Amino acid sequence: MRRDDPSPVHVTNVGGACPLLLIGDHAGRAIPRRLDGLGLTSADMDTHIAWDIGVAGLGERLAARLDACFIRQTYSRLVVDCNRKPGAPAAMPEISDGVTIPGNLGLDTQTQAARRAEIYQPYQDAIGAELDRRAGRPTILVSLHSFTPVMQGVVRPWRMGVLHRGDSAFSSRVLALLQRELGEAAGDNEPYKMDDTDNTVPLHADPRGLDYLELEVRQDLIADAAGQDEVADLVARLLTEALTPG
């Protein structure tokens, strides 16, 4: 990266009192200037292949409503996907939802290592440092994501989904609350299952023995400020309720 490129990490509300630590692996869509836009059009960069639409705004609103810290990635998942293990093909995809990524074709190991060192690692280090500062405090890692309403021609009817491995009490409580509010529009491991492709939650929560939540929100619901406010109101209320189960 160049000196005038933005930092790969943006942190909101450092020291927030809430036990929830919010993170946004795919919240940004910046591309380092040296990469010349990865050869993509501005229209490509506006779509779900480049970022999780609405997550940055949703996370900022949740941080304010909950007094929570929110750590988000600034760069596009197409430069390096922070929720994929280093070295995985999907970490720097050559094709995403049928769109060829010219700037990712035939990357050599040196280029891949540079992207990890300059973008992936500072983001993961920031999460780890915040968790270290919270040592001894109750903490739950909350990973915020959004999903496109239609993927490869398949309509996704869910409004929100909870991704988990069947080992999270907090995820189970949040899922039950979402199903109470949304019925079948709340997906259990929909539109994805939490599996070995996920990186950030296992990387940080598992070694520390922390509970977690991986929340997916349909992108059309949070594509603008009004939608982000509405969803933040609902999610903040349910997360607060889940923290104090009766």
Image (spheres, rainbow, N blue to C red):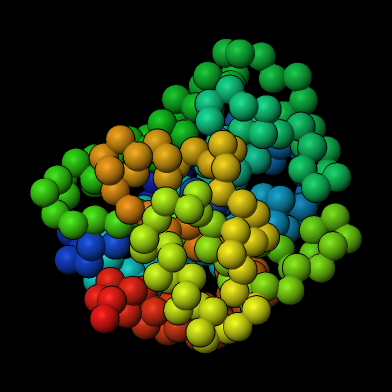
Above or below for 56 versus 109: below
In this view, the residue in front, 147 or 176, is: 176
Is residue 122 at least partly visible in the picture? yes
Instruction: Give percent across and percent down for residue 47.
Output: 72, 58
Instruction: Give percent across and percent down for residue 193.
Output: 61, 51
Above or below for 161 versus 42: below
Instruction: Give percent across and percent down for residue 25.
Output: 49, 49
Q: Quadrant of the C terminus?
A: bottom left
Is residue 42 at least partly visible in the picture? no
* In this rendering, position of residue 29 left or right of residue 205: right
* In this rendering, position of residue 128 left or right of residue 197: left
In this view, the residue in front, 2 or 158, is: 158
* In this rendering, position of residue 215 left or right of residue 146: left
Q: Which residue sits at x=41%, y=31%?
A: 121
Q: Which residue sits at x=56%, y=36%?
A: 196
**Where is residue 145, by image quadrant?**
bottom right
In this view, the residue in front, 108 or 191, is: 191
Instruction: Give percent across and percent down for residue 154.
Output: 84, 62
Tally the marks.
Answer: 0
**Where is residue 158, by image quadrant?**
bottom right
Q: Which residue sits at x=47%, y=75%?
A: 176
Residue positioned most to the right: 153
Above or below for 159 versus 141: below
In this view, the residue in front, 76 or 143, is: 143
Q: Which residue sits at x=69%, y=41%?
A: 37
